[in-house]
Image (spheres, helix red, strand yellow):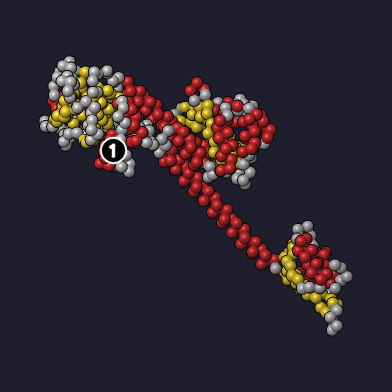
Amino acid sequence: MFVNPAFERTTGYSRAEVIGRNCRFLQGRDTDLAVVARLGEALSRGEHCTGTLLNYRKDGTPFWNELSLSPVHDESGVLVQHVGIQTDVTAKVLAEQAAEEHLRAEQAARAAAERAQRQLALLAEVTTVLAAALDIDDSVQRLSGLVVPLMSDWCTVHLMGPAGGQRISARHRDDDKAPLMRRLEGLDPRGLSAGSLTAGVLSGGDPVLVDVDDALLSRGIDDPDLLEVYREAGVRTAIVVPLHARSTLLGVLTLFSDGSGRSFDDDDLFIAADLARRAALSLDNTLLFQREHAVAEQLQRSLLPQLPAVEGLDCAARYLPSSVGAHVGGDWYDVFALPDGTVGIAIGDVMGHDMTAAAAMGQLRSVLRSYAWQGASPSVVLDRLDQLVQGLEMAQLATCVYGRLDLRTGAQGLLQLCNAGHLPPVLRTPQGHVRLLGGPPSLLVGAALGTTRTEVEEALAPGSMLVLCTDGLVEHRGRGIDDGLAALQAAVASAPAGSAEAVCQHLLDELAQGRLEDDVALLVLRVLP
């Protein structure tokens, strides 16, 4: 083995210490043995090879050694020796390592910034998304859709119910596990033991971040079926945070990682707790709206009349609350016998969608009955109703149709009708002809005093059918009022010739499809032969 002075200066070894030794004495504990093996294989094949190794000087200090080995052959082609050229490339390697570390640091900082941005966007989005929810189930589904897969691989939402009851909603990032999530939702959430993490948070405990193993699952779940589902879903780590709003604990949100490579840290716990606080406030608002809706609907239904039995008249009516949001309007209808033997017919809609509108509807119905009882004509009844509404500020605005039907002659009925800003009634004659009744409607009730209201008269032969409704039946997003009235007339024309009840159901089947965007009041009257 030959060495030159440069080798001695680089390694610290003298020529006498090196001659006759294998160059492996330069290797140490951190030398890459894979590179050593590759160089050895090339030497055995008599091939040129290069490699960079971490070597050690005589004093033990490391340096990066770029080694180039070339075979030397004699004139007959026999390999006689190898020439090895070693270059100290420590500065170059350290510079490359520094650049790589800087790049990794930049990438880590960028990933952290992007993660923080996603988390902040998620927190900002949760209020907006949940505010658009239609009901509590929709709210929970929207919440699950926000956190999976952005924050977790799967999640559960435990909601507290009346009398201590619970229900559970679950979502997984893997669509193939959707049946497993439905199975979880069908099991009794009370299968969790009193010592489970969920039970601890429901009892007022702090948010929890924990690594989950089978022993922890077994201690926290009493129900074998529930335990099986959690095992199949896969749990590595979990975050459990309370859904707490206005001093009320609504439930618990639990986020899981399932072995996808996701892991949770304290930042995730903080974000999850903040998200849960925002979500809980939106959930509580939804519950408040639902309770208000239920009270308003109950109030409204209590104010609507039971249709009386009127000789010579077949009547049917329906009221359907809006299925969009938590709104209940002031839609109403009425049929009542008058002292002179005629029949009062009314339908109307008080502007607004709350309990105030429902209460105002009840007042208007009572006032209209009082004025009608005095025997006044429909136009006078609506004029007096208008004066009282504006004088006592009973409601902002309302539409109304009031008619008085006289069936006493026996041959045919006579209908006197006045319309204050409401949809025109639809008449189907015994011959099957369908048309709208009345001329242009007058101003709404409450719009202006001293309004001249047009009154029309219409003869109703036996077998005639009269349909009155509010705009929720015919007008919705994507269909204007003119198209809606045309659809109503077509539905009336195709209605069966049977009872008013059958006609009423037919009209709802034809026109009230899907989610109702507004309340619907419907009144159908048939003049009997």
Q: Please provide percent x and percent y for residue 305.
A: 29, 20
Query: What residue is pinned by disc 1?
Result: 490
Q: Position of residue 267 (x, y in %)?
A: 55, 42
**Image quadrant for the N terminus?**
bottom right
Image quarter of the C terminus: top left
Q: 10 Å neighbourhood of mark 1: few (<14), some, or many (≥20)?
A: some
Q: Position of residue 187 (x, y in %)?
A: 58, 29
Which residue, as the protein is rendered here, is positioned at the far top? 339
Check disc 1 and give the amino acid type. Answer: Ala
Q: Nearer the viewer, residue 242 or 84?
A: 242
Residue 72 appears in view = yes
Residue at 51 percent of width and 51 percent of height: 114
Quick one: which residue is furthest to the bottom in this view? 75
Q: Is residue 355 left or right of residue 185?
A: left
Quadrant position of residue 505: top left
| 484 vs 478, nearest the viewer | 484
